[in-house]
């Protein structure tokens, strides 16, 4: 593409015509039938109208798309699963590279590895790997995109046994800002692979990723149990005590959530907020029964914990996370759950404005903490818990109230929080958040950013400024 057809700051018709000529994938423009569907992302707060949406059919198309962005100077957003709660995968007036056309997955059962193209989501990935009795740590909602999730840590139910998705990333193919295709492995461009294991979408467009897989039985012990919120203190304390020395096969969370109007929920509890425990035990099923026994003694209102397919557990939270609702999220590490922290959680749960909001404490430890602090850009690996404020609501009129709940809860939790939280769960990311998340490793990331993207073409992300 020539510089004359894509002038700085504008996308001229001739530039698009020229791009179309060599483009194998789809070019979706305002007014076309697919435009509105294609610009919808998870967070309904970001209703944006890009100048064009490019859906590549391969790396050559991605090179052309990046070239168009570089020459025009227009904002460039990368869209995978569309789950960015910060709205990074959609932009106004710019170019969106929508990776959803790239769906190839190849499992190598002998090496226990899988290669996935960048449009694959975790539901698709898990389905293919489970056909071989294998899996790696993946998203807790099936529609989350594989690269976006992995580039920002990748926290899933298997993480205490097998680490974050980023820890299982063996190699990646990436189109850099100057349109080169680079492969990053432990032996080739190793520093880039280091950066991709948690440094976000800062270094280019990932076209394919390769993961280490693990044997994961097709039937695990998983589910959700819900208790009367009046028992919150007892439930959270027991959950914490079991978590303290639980086997690494256990990945779970305790959360304040609203029960849906489903047949498995007693009528009088439908639509009411409860304290729930959800997750899975990917190990011996009898051991799982034993672990759950004391919690069952607290007489849950709903108890769905049972042997079930791994693929079912991976989809359990899908219904509570519809696309298009409004979302304002924040998450942080907490160093421990003493009585004060538990009381604070219960107090703040009682003030949640929207029934769709989930207020979650996630148990960590195990394999996550065995990876060295400098082995990836991710920090806070020794913290025992994360707190997630996943505020979701339906109408713009309720924005202020819901955002205020997240901000006030964040302030209230400050005495208990510790630095180093990954930023994939945060809607509003400040410079201080970037410093807090990466700590000492920020300088190393900035140097890497200067090597691969010195002019910050890839800036719609948890942005690392070039050194
Ligand atoms: C309902 C829901 C559930 C979630 N559950 C979890 C969870 O269990 N664990 C967890 O760790 N996180 C979870 N997240 C957070 C999620 O991992 C991040 O939002 C992640 O960025 C989503 O990736 P995506 O492809 O779906 O999103 P997109 O919005 O499509 O992409 C987000 C960003 O990732 C980067 N990116 C995506 N694809 C590429 C690519 N091919 N090349 C370079 N950069 C790319 C870009 O910066 C892009 O802006 C969840 C989010 C939601 C909304």
Image (tube, rainbow, N blue to C red):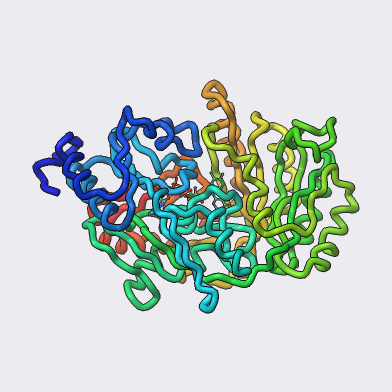
How many marks the image carries: the answer is 0
Specify the quadrant of the image occupied by residue 202: bottom left
Q: Which sits in the foreground, 199 or 304? A: 304
- Residue at 89% in and 47% down: 299
Residue 96 drawn at (x, y percent)? 33, 42
**Res. 437 visible in picture:** no
Q: Nearer the viewer, residue 415 or 240?
A: 240
Q: Is 265 situated above or below 177?
A: above
Which residue is located at x 62 percent, y 53 percent?
386
Question: Is residue 76 or residue 383 the one in the foreground?
Answer: 76
In the rendered view, does 293 fall on the left or right side of 205?
Answer: right
Quadrant location of residue 200? bottom left
Residue 304 picture location, percent across and down:
79, 49
Left/right placement of residue 324 relative to residue 385 reads left
For residue 282, above or below residue 314? below
Q: Is residue 233 left or right of residue 316?
A: right
Q: Position of residue 162 (x, y in %)?
A: 60, 69
Residue at image x 36%, y 58%? 207
Residue drawn at the location 70% of the way across and 45% of the way down: 255
In the rendering, at what x and y percent does residue 154 appear?
53, 58
């Amino acid at each position: 593409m020539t510089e004359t057809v894509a002038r700085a700051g504008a996308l001229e018709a001739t530039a698009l015509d020229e791009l179309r000529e060599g483009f194998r994938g789809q070019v979706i423009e305002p007014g076309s039938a697919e435009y509105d569907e294609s610009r919808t992302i998870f967070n309904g707060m970001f209703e944006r109208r890009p100048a064009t949406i490019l859906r590549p059919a391969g790396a050559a198309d991605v090179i052309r798309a990046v070239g168009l962005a570089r020459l025009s100077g227009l904002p460039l957003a990368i869209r995978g699963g569309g789950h960015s709660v910060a709205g990074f995968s959609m932009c106004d007036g710019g170019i969106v590279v929508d990776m959803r056309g790239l769906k190839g997955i190849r499992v190598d059962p002998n090496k226990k590895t899988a290669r996935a193209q960048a449009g694959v989501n975790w539901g698709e990935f898990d389905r293919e790997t489970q056909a071989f009795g294998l899996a790696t740590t993946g998203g807790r909602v099936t529609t989350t995109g594989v690269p976006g999730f992995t580039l920002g840590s990748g926290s899933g139910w298997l993480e205490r046994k097998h680490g974050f998705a980023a820890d299982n990333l063996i190699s990646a193919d990436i189109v850099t800002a100057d349109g080169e295709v680079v492969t990053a492995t432990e032996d080739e461009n190793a520093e880039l692979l280091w950066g991709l294991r948690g440094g976000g979408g800062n270094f280019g467009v990932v076209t394919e990723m390769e993961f280490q897989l693990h044997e994961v039985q097709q039937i695990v012990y998983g589910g959700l149990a819900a208790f009367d919120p009046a028992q919150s203190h007892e439930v959270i304390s027991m959950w914490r005590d079991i978590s303290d020395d639980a086997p690494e096969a256990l990945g779970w969370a305790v959360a304040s959530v609203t029960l849906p109007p489903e047949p498995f929920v007693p009528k009088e509890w439908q639509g009411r907020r409860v304290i729930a425990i959800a997750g899975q035990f990917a190990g011996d099923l009898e051991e799982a029964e034993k672990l759950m026994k004391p919690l069952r003694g607290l007489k849950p209102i709903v108890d769905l914990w049972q042997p079930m397919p791994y693929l079912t557990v991976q989809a359990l939270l899908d219904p509570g996370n519809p696309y298009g609702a409004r979302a304002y999220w924040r998450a942080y590490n907490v160093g421990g759950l003493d009585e004060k922290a538990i009381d604070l959680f219960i107090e703040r749960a009682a003030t949640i404005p929207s029934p769709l909001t989930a207020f979650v404490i996630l148990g960590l430890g195990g394999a996550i903490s065995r990876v060295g602090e400098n082995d990836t850009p991710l920090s806070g690996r020794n913290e025992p818990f994360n707190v997630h404020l996943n505020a979701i609501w339906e109408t713009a009129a309720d924005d202020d109230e819901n955002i205020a709940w997240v901000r006030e809860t964040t302030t209230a939790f400050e005495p208990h929080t510790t630095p180093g939280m990954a930023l994939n769960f945060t809607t509003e990311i400040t410079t201080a958040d970037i410093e807090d998340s990466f700590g000492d490793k920020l300088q190393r990331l900035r140097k890497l950013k200067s090597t691969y993207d010195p002019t910050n073409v890839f800036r719609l992300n948890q942005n690392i400024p070039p050194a």
